[in-house]
Amino acid sequence: MNYFFHLLILINIYAILALSLNLLVGYTGLLSIAHAAFYGIGAYVATLVMIKLGIAFLPAMLLGILIAMLLSLLIALASLRFRGDYFVLASLGFQVIVYSLLHNWISLTRGPYGIPGIPKPSLFGYEIGSLVSFFVFSLIIALIVLTILYRLMISPFGRVLQAIRDDELATLTLGKHVASFKMKSFVVASGLAAAAGALYATYVTYIDPTSFNLDESILMLSMAIIGGTGNVRGPLMGAVLLILLPEVLRFLAIPDTVAPQVRLIIYGLLLILMMRFRPQGIAGTYQFE
Amino acid sequence: MALLELRHITKSFDGLKALDDLSLAFEQGRITSLVGPNGAGKTTLFNVISGLLLPEHGEIFYHGTPLNGFTPWQRAQRGIGRLWQDVRVFEKLTTLDNVLLAKKRNLGEGILSNFFLVPAVNKFERHNREQAHHWLAFVGLSGKERTLAGDLSYGQQKLLAVARLLANDAQLLLLDEPTSGIHPHLVDTILEVIRKIVKEGRTVIVIEHNFSIVFEISDWICLMDKGRIELAGIPDQVARAPLLREVYLGI
């Protein structure tokens, strides 16, 4: 039963990540491979201010979100005026920089040793310690994120994002400040990824840089693309599928030493098969080109 | 005062002058046709007016104020609209959404207003919807609201793109070959729509290759060749000018 709730909590966290990434990939047509970096920033900022300053979970999470949003704003200002390909490269660069900072800024992050003993979140004096209560808590946060994103996706704001995705130049000549819309979309998506990071850190109570590396970014992209982008169903299905898949693999007698590699191979195969046979993903409405 | 005035515009690509010291004025409420052989610089001129290309020399005045320094989206905001030769409708959005999207200064396009000003956003959207239906009816696309723009015929897409410009409140419409490649019966619809647009006081500049259409709809015709205006006048004058045959047929 514990194992079951553990999986549900992971699904909630990754649902936030895949859904927020979908705002970028599926709605704005911006391919970001820095989502894990913002996830990591949320996790590290929340953790550090909780441990070092004794700040409560909610303000700590909000601070993580705020810092992720500020950093994404800076990257957006530097890269979004250029064509799409440059944005992909800029996001890759940012991912690598954040990972190496987390890895090498030992006085702050303890580098590869990671930070243990992260306190469980507490709300109004009630500590969310048990698995079930953490599941409920993570579900509430995931639902809030879902509501925010859904509202944006069906709004006139979301309509402009889709127009940019379909034809940037035509959107521009209708008087829309395309760069500003892209920037807002990136900032919102990054802030929500940071919320997932704070949630993750207080759930596992130990973080190290490997949870926020390039592989993680690619896992999130795989969730969005395999599940399907352009609506909320697709990324949700992608998150469920790719969280449960390795658990299924556990029952096959694959030695622990090769299991992670096998998992990556399966993600890769899935991506290639999807691209070939169902480019819009399992439940997607938009086909990333 | 002319609605749009170009003064000594020069634009070259790799040393080749696409626009060569071109000066031209466009009066409000008139249909002006730009004609000329391929490579005359007609589309380049549109790109310069919309701000997608910056000229090396020269100035553009719109309502008497200089446009230099305004980005493409700022020019669109000021009422300069563009119909692309390859239409560029948003194929994965519905016909209605294509038009709704064009509305300027839409409250719901801000992030926070979608959470804190929901009633105002909804009210704005209802009003926008009514207007969008009006413009779709104006171009004869009523009943197609829910169709994906990509599923419309090419001619219908051109009509949709025009409806989008009208909803965008474009006052100067740059139409790049609005009738090319579409079914003959839709050509008449498009010409009718263009005439109605001008009756509303809007101004149209059209690039057109079909001379029977040019002479039928134009109030003013400009013949372009090698980046210059070789001849300009009312249809009767231009039709009689020997230069027209010279430029087109090289005789």
Image (spheres, helix red, strand yellow):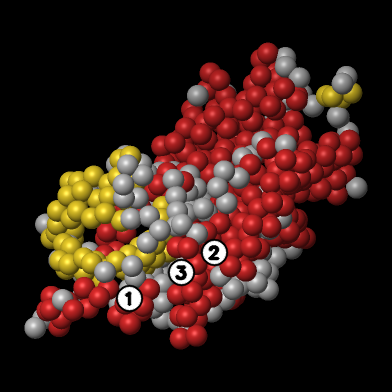
Residue of label 2: B163
Q: SS at mark 3? A: helix
Up the image or down, B16 lies above or below A148; here it is below
Query: In percent of the image, x 27 and y 73: which residue is there?
Result: B235
Residue of label 3: B195
Numbered marks: total: 3
Determine which of the numbered discs, if any, sits on residue B214 in the image: 1
Query: In percent of the image, x 84 and y 36: which residue is there?
Result: A137
Q: Is the residue marked by circle 1 packed among few (<14), some (14-19), or many (20+) residues within 10 Å?
A: many
Upstream in sequence: badge 3 or badge 2: 2
Upstream in sequence: badge 3 or badge 1: 3
Label 3 amino acid?
Answer: Arg
Residue A167, percent across and down? 48, 60
Q: Is residue B165 left or right of residue A244?
A: left
From the viewer's side, name the closer residue of B191 and A191: B191
Residue A270, percent across and down? 61, 66
Inter-mark Cα distance, 1 to 2? 22 Å
Q: Is the residue marked by circle 2 packed among few (<14), some (14-19), or many (20+) residues within 10 Å?
A: many
